[in-house]
Structure formats: structure tokens, C-alpha cells
Image (cartoon, rainbow, N blue to C red):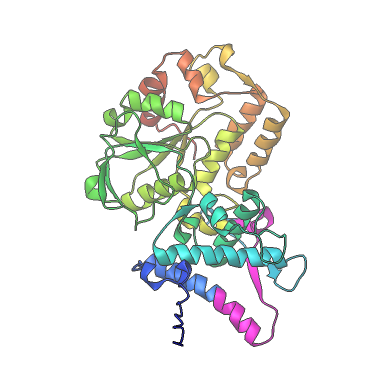
Amino acid sequence: MAKRKVVRRKTPTPPASNTKSRVKLSPRDRKTMDALTGLADGVVRAATKRRDPHVDIPSRTLTNARYSSRKRIIEMGNKTNRRELFNLSQAKSYMQTMLVASGCKRLVEQGKTTSIRGLYYLLKHTIEGTKENTFDEQSDCDPVIEDTEVLLSSLREELHLYADKRGEMVGNITLTDSGDEIDCSRMGSGGYAVPSIVEPEVIQLDRKKCDAKFVLHVEKGTVWQRFNEDKFWKKHNCILTHGAGQPPRGVRRMLNRLHHELKLPVYCVLDNDPWGYYIYSVIKQGSINLAFESQRMAIPEAKFLGLRSIDMERCDLSSGVQIALNDTDRKRAKQIAAYPWFEKKRDWQREIQRMLKNDFKLEVEALISKDISYVTEVYVPERLKKRDWLD
């Protein structure tokens, strides 16, 4: 009887370690990969020495953020929170941190990106032999992604993660996006959608291809649409941006690059309310949550063009555009007035105190009560001509 021929099948190589799927890494990607592999090597070293694996994650809290009066930005302090594998209350969060780092390493190796929602689904599964999930909800994954960022001193975008696009740009500049040349003066009514990842490997800026003299950033898309429709950017030779309220990281990073790389002044047209003040604060000094990256996000030279608390009288607005302050508004205004970067500035203290005394706030759209194009044809041009802004 003939012997049965046994065919041994090779075990397929998992996608994460498939060398064929790897791509040539950029210098920035190599730096990120070194940080990711260094994190894994730390676990191996701890295990080899029979020590408990742990990571020390910089604390993203108000108490661990400080304002540098010299640099004029918010910086992260030295406080850390230790996360240990063999601590029952920390084991899950420790493993989640390693899982996120592993997922990001796979993305960098393959030269691919995904959304933070996509990473959540990439990593979500039930642990074998248990009923325990790696992540139950997206809200469980998001803070771990932020922890991984600060742990590795890497932006989310450097980990090949992106968020939803929010914000548009139009104006006298031509840029290169993933190899495609984009003329932002020929984007029609919609404008160029500012992506989440705007790093130099993706978007290249060239001063020779930028005729604009400044950047005008407005708070909301509705106001931006008025400026775009009125061709404000063409009449005043500028770049016009918005961030759909609180600007996302991609828009903030783009503003930072336009300012520092192309030497363009940045002026902000925001609501006259605590939220508008806060948006300006984040653009100018950075945020507590991203204090470790203020150097690449903040624009200390950014100017607040308006709206102002004196505009009710200065622009002769009708009382119908007033929005009464509530207790939350008053509390938030006092908190902002106490920010170290505002507390010693008399103009800002007068501005906030006047708003509180008025007991009402104003949206930029309130200027429409004067004329549909009053903000583009009168208000902003006058403020720029008179250099009438807050710093």
C-alpha cells in the first residue's frame, strides 16, 4: 500500500509582520518607529531583569501645565502617572497602551493611516478565554491614544492617525498635497478642506507660491462663507481659514506652519464671548491637553481682531442682537481673565470686564444686522487699517 503523502502547509505570516507590506519610511516615520520599538524594548528589558513592566505617562492636567513667559506658550511640566502591568487597578490600561502602540506601529510599517475610530475597530476584540474586551467603547480608546502621544512625544498624526476634517482654506497660495498641486485661489465656494495630517511629508508649502500677505482666521464656517463669497481674500490678498468653532489640530497646525514657515501674520475674527476668547487663547498659547506640542501648534504673535465688547456702541448695533450671559458664561469669563497670559494684560482685562458689565455677548453674525457684507467690507478692513486688535 502506497504511503500517503503529507503536505505541510506553511503558517501564513500575520499582516502586522508581513515584510512585503512595509514601505520606505520617511525620516519622521523612522523617528516615530524608534519611539514605538523603544517602548516595546522596555517591556522586554523589564521581563529579562524580572522587574515589573511599567510606563510613566506625563500628566495632562492643569497642575502639570505652566505658561512660559519667555516663549509665550503653555508647556507641560515633569509630573507623571505610573502605569504598571502587575497592578490590578492599572493592568488593563497598561495593556491598552501597549495595544495602541502596537496598532500604530503596524500603520507606520505599512505606510497607511486610519481614523481614531478606525484604530478602535482595528484593536477591539474579546480576549481569548475571557469575556473581557480590549475596549468596550470608543471613549475607552481615545484617552489611551492621547496617553500614547505624550508617552512617545509624538503627535497623533505622526502615529498615522487622523480625525474628521473640519475647516476650509481659500486664498492666494498654491501648495502640494500628497504630490498633487492645489491652487487655493481656485477652489470655488467650498474651499480647500484642511486635512487632519498636514505635516511636511504630506503637505509642502513654498513661499514662492504664496502671494498672500496675512492669514485671516474666522470662527465658523458660516462667517467664512460670507468672506469667501465676497472674495475678501482676493481684495485684501490674504489666506482665509476657519475651524468650525474650536479649530481641530489640523487647522491649528496649518496656521502654525503658515505663520512660522511662510512668515504670515495671523488675525482672528471670533465671537465676543468666553468661547471666542478661549479659541483665541488656544490658537495663541496652545492648550493644556496638547501642552507637550505647543511649539508646533501655538502662535504667540496671533492677534484678536474682534468682535469686541465696545462694538455694540462702536458699530451702532440694535439691542436685538444681544445674547444674555448665563452663569456658566460669567464663571468661564472670570477663569479666562485669570489665565497667566491674560491676567497681566490691561487691554484684555478691560475687554473681559466690559463684557461682564454689559451682561451680554455678541456673535460675529450680529454684524449682519448692519448689512449682509458689513463684516467683510467695513468691520475687518477698518480694524486692519487702524491696527485695532488685542494681543
Q: Residue drawn at (70%, 64%), measured in percent from left and top?
A: 92
Q: Is 59 within the magenta?
A: yes
Residue 148 coordinates in the image, percent (x, y)? 57, 62
Q: Residue drawn at (62%, 27%), measured in percent from left and top?
A: 355
Near-viewer residue (146 or 375): 146
Decide if residue 69 is in sight here.
no
Q: Is 374 within the magenta?
A: no
Near-viewer residue (74 or 357): 74
Query: Is 190 situated above or below 377?
Result: below
Return the residue found at the far left.
208
Query: Is 71 situated above or below 389?
Result: below
Residue stretch rendered in magenta on the structure: 40-66
| Horizontal relation, residue 218 to residue 74: left or right | left
Q: Quadrant of residue 25?
A: bottom left
Return the residue found at the far right.
88
Q: Residue drawn at (55%, 61%), measured in percent from left and top?
A: 149
Return the residue found at the far front.
1
Q: Quadrant of residue 9?
A: bottom left
Decide if residue 35 is in sight here.
yes
Residue 294 coordinates in the image, percent (x, y)? 51, 55
